[in-house]
Every structure is written in structure tokens, then in C-alpha cells.
Image: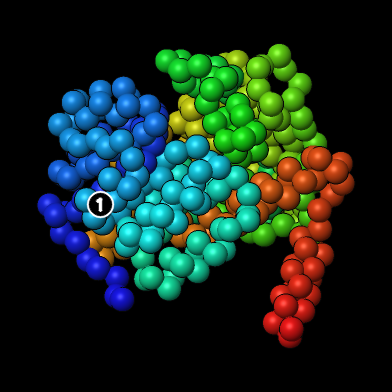
Amino acid sequence: MKVEMYDLENIKILIVGCGSIGRRHARNLRELGVQDILLLDADQNRTETLARELQIQNFESLESALEQKPHAALICAPTSLHLELASEALRHGCNLFIEKPLSHCMEGVCELLDDVKSKERTLLAGYNLRFYPLLNTAKRWLCEGRVGHITSARLHFGSYLPWRHPLEDYRLGYGARQSLGGGVILDAVHEIDIALWFFGWPEMIYCAGGKYSNLEIDVEDTAEIALTFSDKIVSIHLDSVQRPAERWFEITGTEGRIEGDLFARSLRHFDSGTREWFLADVATPIEDTYRSEMRHFLDCLMGKATPLIDGVTAVQSLRVAEEAKKSMQWRLPISIAALNKLEEDVESTVSHR
């Protein structure tokens, strides 16, 4: 079966999960010209309200929605449900957009990616920050060697969980519940993805963290992750406690420094030669990244692009997140090289049975 190409006016898209992100995607798809949008959520009041607003259809079950033969499914449900929902949509021939992370653990993920490949479907993972001009400019600076050899970097995300979705009870959301794939490491997996995008694959992972606040959650609310390389160290701070929220990064090189603030929409680098700061023009709001992401997904469906963040890329951040959680639990560093060797040995043993 060959990958089908669709015309914008004929594309039919199912959105599974109509929380804040699902609603955002539905509105953006409508603005981008998609007329045939289907909605599904366990909360019927939520889907009915959105369906009335956008004058689109809502359904009570996945089966009834898939009977409409959508060309693609956006999986925006809680993280622990991603694989089950994506697999069923794929079985019905859907192309897939899966919100980050792909799942709450690695189990079953590679099988899904194999099925996507064998069925020749498109899979785009929902890492909207990859479409942020501020980060793309910083990445370009790194590739150009603007600040020399990188020796260290720090990424910081802190945001009070109850304030993120003020119209909802934070205790019921996926970010607060282990059973739904919550916890700040998975919830803020963007920072892990950015670290891998900027600096590549680490040699060692160490994570310390836990639940240290009075938030009514059963997952970690604070984590400090260290990724070590042969020539640099990258640290990532994540928490669900900080007020006011901050999201920034700083990168130190032998010839200068890069500083970026995602919420303030500012990016600059220090040139050791001129001893001056250079400011970038990156005032685009983060909200625009979601529209760019959906435009890119439509381009993929129409054969105009290939997924910027495909399943293989998305697996990398999920794997590091999973190993960070193990490190936090065991209070031990995790050697990626040792893990790779163990996986190779297991695969070799299985293949020779």
C-alpha cells in the first residue's frame, strides 16, 4: 500500500482527546482550511461545546468515529492511552499525529513504529517547540560555531501545575497521575528533546528528583537531570512548583555564550571577540508554533513535506525520559553505552533461538 496524498479540501481528521491541546489543534485546523473535523472525548460536554463552536461532528465512541474513515487521527488523550488509541486508528488506515511524548514508557512503541512503516502511513510527533524560530535560530548558531566548542548547557522549566489549566482541576489531569503517564519528566519532555536536538546522544544519564511539594499528585514534581558527554555536560531542571513560570536555556562555549528565554521571547549570544552581546529578532509567540505544527502535518499528508519529528526522533526523548525516571528511582547513573550493549545482546540471543 502506497502513502496516499490528499487535497486540503478533502482531508478528514479525527481528534481524539479534546482537552486544551485538542481544542487548540481543532481551531488551528479549521483556520488552516480543514472542513471535515471529527471530535472524540470521554467528556461529552467538552466535545459538544467545541463541535457547536466550530460546526463540526462529535462522536461518543472511537469505533463510531473511525467508521467515518478519517484520513488522519490526532492522538491528544492522556499519555498512557496514546499507544492503544494510535494502534486502533492505524488499523483503520489513519495517518497519525501523536502528542508528546509518544507514550508513558517504551513498551510497545517500537511495534507501533514498525506498523506505521509496514502500512506506509505518516507519523508526526507533537513537539511544537521544534517550530519555534527562537530555538531554530539558537540551533543555527550552534551549527555555525558562533560561541566555539560547547562545554556545558542548562535548560530550565518551572511552572506551577494548578495554574497551567486554570479551568480544570489539576488533580484529575494526566500531569498529576501516574496511571495516566504524568509527572514533570514526561510532562516537560520538550526540554529533553531540545537537549538531544542541540547536543546529540549522551553517554550517561543521572537524575535526582521526587515529589517535594504539597501538590495533590502521585508523581514527581521536581527533577534534576544530568546528561554527560565526552566533551560537555548538559543539565535539565524540571518542576511543577515554580511561580511565576520560567522556561529558558543557557549554553556556554569556549568563545562565548547563548542565552534564550522562551517566555520572554528573547535570544542573544555573547561574542568573546567583540565582547558584545548580539540580539536576535525572534519575537514570534510560542502560540504560533502550534499553527506551524498543524500546517506541517497537513503538508505531510499532501505530500509536500516529510515529518520533521518522526517516530524515530520522538523515541529518543522518550527513551531518555524513561531512563531518567529509572535513575531517579534507583539513585544511580544510567550508562547509555551499557544499555545499547545489553539490547544488542538480547536481540542477538532472540534472533538465534
Q: Position of residue 17 (x, y in %)?
A: 39, 36
Q: Is residue 96 visible?
A: no
Type of colouring: rainbow
Q: Position of residue 114 (x, y in %)?
A: 50, 69
Q: Nearer the viewer, residue 178 or 163?
A: 178
- Which residue position holds label 1? 67
In the rendered view, tell whether residue 113 sits above or below residue 140. Answer: below
The residue sitting at 15% across, 31% down in the picture is 55
Looking at the rendering, in which quadrant would you find the C terminus? bottom right
Q: Position of residue 23 (x, y in %)?
A: 32, 31
Q: Quadrant of residue 187?
A: top right
In the rendered view, tell whether residue 197 sits above or below residue 179. Answer: below
In the rendered view, tell whether residue 64 sits above or below residue 115. Answer: above
Q: Nearer the viewer, residue 253 or 329?
A: 329
The residue sitting at 20% across, 37% down in the picture is 57
The residue sitting at 57% across, 20% down in the picture is 171
The residue under label 1 is which amino acid type? Answer: Glu
Q: Nearer the viewer, residue 150 or 42?
A: 42
Looking at the rendering, in which quadrant would you find the N terminus? bottom left
Q: Position of residue 177 (x, y in %)?
A: 61, 29
Q: Is residue 309 visible?
A: yes
